[in-house]
Image (spheres, coloured by chain):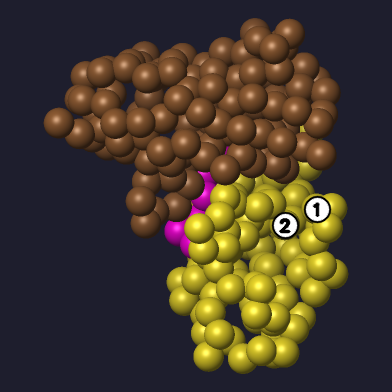
Amino acid sequence: DVVMTQSPLSLPVTLGQPASISCKSSQSLVHSDGNTYLNWFQQRPGQSPRRLIYKVSNRDSGVPDRFSGSGSGTDFTLKISRVEAEDVGVYYCMQGTHWPFTFGPGTKVDIK
Amino acid sequence: EVQLVESGGGLVQPGGSLRLSCAASGFAFSAYWMHWVRQAPGKGPVWVSRINSDGNLITYADSVKGRFTVSRDNAKNTLYLQMNSLRAGDTAVYFCARGGTGDRWGQGTLVTVSS
C-alpha cells in the first residue's frame, strides 16, 4: 500500500497567520491517465471529513480561496493563507491513484 | 442538495453480521462511483471498498476481503455494505462517499463489535 506521511502532526496557529502542511507519498501519485490524485480533507470536531482540494490544486465547490494546494510526484503541500477560527480541525492528505486509497496520519490544527 | 444518509449500524457480537445502507439523494446516483470508508475512534479514515456506477467493478481493502460485500441498487438510489464475520477491529464509524475520491460524505453510522 502507498504510505502517506504528513508534517507537522500538530500545528498551533495564530488567527490571521498563514499555515502550511506537508504531505509525502511512498511512491509517485501520477496515474497512468496522467492525473495526480492527491486530495486534501478537513475534518472538524464531530464532523465527517470534507474534501477541500482534489488533484493536487483544485478547490472543491464552496471552499474558501485561502486554501491552496501544490506539489507533484511524491511531495505536496496544503497552505492556508490566513487561518480563521473555523479552520480548526484535522487535515488529511489522501491518495486516490493506487488501490487501496490511503490517508496520511492527519495534522491537527488549533489556535494558539 | 446532495445528501448521503447511512444507517444500519449498531452493537454486534464478534462473528456476527450487519448490513449497512446509504441512501443517496440530490444527484444522479447511478452515474457515480461510490465508496465505503471507516474511521475507528480517535484514528484516521481508512478506505474499505468501492463500486463503480454499474456495480460490476468492485474492490476491497485486504482487511475486509472475503468478509464484506458491497452492492448497490440504482433504482433505489442506495448503496449497501454487508459485513460478516465481524471482529473487534471492525469497530468504527462507517461513511459512504461519492465519486472517484469522495467529494461528498455522509454523516456516518457507528458499528461496535463487542461481546
Labels 2 & 1 near each other (Cβ < 8 A): yes
- Residue drawn at 21 percent across, 19 percent down: B15
| Label 2 Cα crowd, 10 Å radius (few <14 / some 14-19 / many 20+) | many
Say if residue B61 shows up in the picture.
Answer: no
- Residue drawn at 64 percent across, 18 percent down: B78
Q: Secondary structure at mark 2?
A: strand
Residue B12 pos. (x, y %): 26, 26
- Residue drawn at 66 percent across, 73 percent down: A86
Q: For this rendering, which residue is in front, A16 or B56?
A: A16
Q: Amino acid at mark 1?
A: Asp
Q: Which residue is mark 2?
A: A52
- Residue drawn at 62 percent across, 13 percent down: B72
The chain letter under disc 1 is A
Residue A70 pos. (x, y %): 75, 64
Residue B68 pos. (x, y %): 41, 18
Residue A76 among magenta residues:
no
Tell me if A91 is positioned left or right of B24 in this view: left
Chain rendered yellow: A
| Label 1 Cα crowd, 10 Å radius (few <14 / some 14-19 / many 20+) | some
Residue stretch rendered in magenta on the structure: A100-106
Chain rendered brown: B
The chain letter under disc 2 is A
Q: Which residue is mark 1?
A: A60
The quarter holding residue B90 reads top left
